[in-house]
Image (cartoon, grey):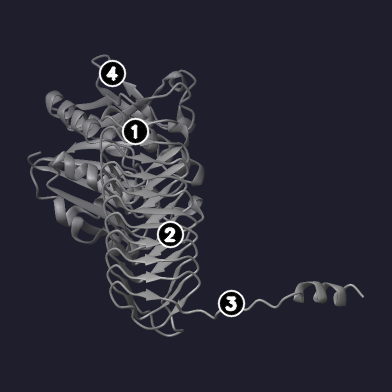
Amino acid sequence: MENLYAVVLAAGKGTRMKSKKHKVLHPVCGKPMIDHILDMLSELGVKESVLVVGHNAEAVQEYVGDRARYAIQENQLGTAHAVMQAESILADQEGITLVLNGDHPLFTPETMEDLVKHHRETQAAATILTAVFEDPAGYGRIIRNEDHSVDRIVEHKDASEEERKVKEVNTGTFCFDNRKLWQALTKVGNDNAQGEYYLPDVIGILNEEGERVSARPIQDAGEALGVNNRVQLAEAEKQMRKRILLKHMMNGVTIIDPDNTYIDAEVVIGPDTVIHPGTFLRGKTQIGEDCTVGPHADLTDIAVGDGTSISHSFLKGSEILAEATVGPFSYIRPGTHMGEKSKVGAFAELKNTRLGEGSKVPHLSYAGDADIGKGVNFSCGAITVNYDGINKHRTTVEDGAFVGCNVNLVAPVRVGKGAYVAAGSTVTDDVPEEALAIARERQTNKEDYAKKLKDRLSK
């Protein structure tokens, strides 16, 4: 939007979170709260966002980087005082300024767009985003004039019995004519018990000057949830998750049990994919079409091709191509690439490994730092011995090779194309193409030894 600015308040201590981490950096559905707000403002078309920081400012600035400009509130002297710190950046601008809190991650671009539109249509100097609560206890009440403009905001503790019956409350989010905001801020005093400068006092100042003050009720009062403690953080997570799941289901994804499915905000899922209960999709995971994920699958930053099946498995930082199969009970670690129609089965683990098209690591195996070609069978109990105590080494298994059960491939080592490695072998040297490698002791049978041993032990 043209000439639209934003001031985001994030200078408080966040004491009730009881955390070393800054409050706005706590994640909601995989994204810190401040990300949700800045992404929303960007989608809204805000020309410039100013982040007011104070306590633990360095952590916020390091995370946010150049996505916002910064104003420092050295001493926390109230919300109006916080906004005043952005004066040098915004005071000379023509247009509209949004003021909102950094701990309100649920606001949507549509809500903010509606607020700004209403502000322009009413030609108000200030517009308050309000919510209607059945139980408004603790919130500042919106007292309106007969023409429906706002007369004042009355805090709960100061409200009369009649005023406390009002269910429309202040959400702490405002839209101002920029010039009039800065003029009014110079007149805000701190004659109160806390000795602080409060932003709602601007409303009274504008009214006294004959300016119009409007209010716009939010359609979904749940968006107005502020996060001040871990209980409210969990509630914000719940509401955001519900919103995310609804979006995916409306886009053609089947979610069997939404109450037991957890999908982060930046996850992408193709249509006709089915998500089973107990599934966690985290980070920037991308899942193609016609996949089956879960039950009880945990994927973080995974790219999954069309038609792939994943169940009861943990995957992180890897790529799974089309029509592959993972699980049950597989562990796919970062740096792994599984080719089309490949398979990793029960109690198998891959780390930093390329598994070729149609290759199988069916069960009870470990392949770490390996390059496994196409059409390879990596049998039960086979492992790559990739660590010598100091360095990691790579193993190569070329196309069409067969690695038997309980084989140790001691890296660095290569198994050639079409070669066989016999079960129980410990391979330390390269295996040529089409060769059979056997690296184990010959079997010796001692006749009647078991009977003699049992007789001796039983005495």
Viewer can see residue 435: yes
Task: Determine contact: label 3, label 4, CB under 8 Å.
Answer: no
The label nearer to you, 3 versus 2, is: 3
Please tell me which of labels 3 and 4 falls first in the chain.
Answer: 4
- Tell me the element at label 1: helix
Please tell me which of labels 3 and 2 falls first in the chain.
Answer: 2
Q: Label 4, on which residue?
A: 145
Spatial CA span between label 3 and label 1: 64 Å
Please tell me which of labels 4 and 2 falls first in the chain.
Answer: 2
Please tell me which of labels 2 and 1 falls first in the chain.
Answer: 2
The label nearer to you, 3 versus 1, is: 3
Amino acid on which the number 3 mark rests in the picture: Gln
Spatial CA span between label 1 and label 4: 36 Å
- At 15% across and 44% down in the image, what residue appears? 46
Rendered image quadrant of residue 243: top left
- Tell me the element at label 2: loop
Amino acid on which the number 4 mark rests in the picture: Asn
Q: Is residue 4 left or right of residue 35?
A: left
Spatial CA span between label 2 and label 1: 26 Å
Classify 238 as above or below 149: below
Spatial CA span between label 4 and label 2: 43 Å
The label nearer to you, 3 versus 4, is: 3
Please tell me which of labels 3 and 1 falls first in the chain.
Answer: 1
Front residue (pair 97, 233): 233
Image coords of residue 279 (percent x, y): 43, 42
Q: Label 2, on which residue?
A: 21
- At 26% across and 36% down in the image, what residue appears? 174
Rendered image quadrant of residue 142: top left
Classify 127 as above or below 79: above
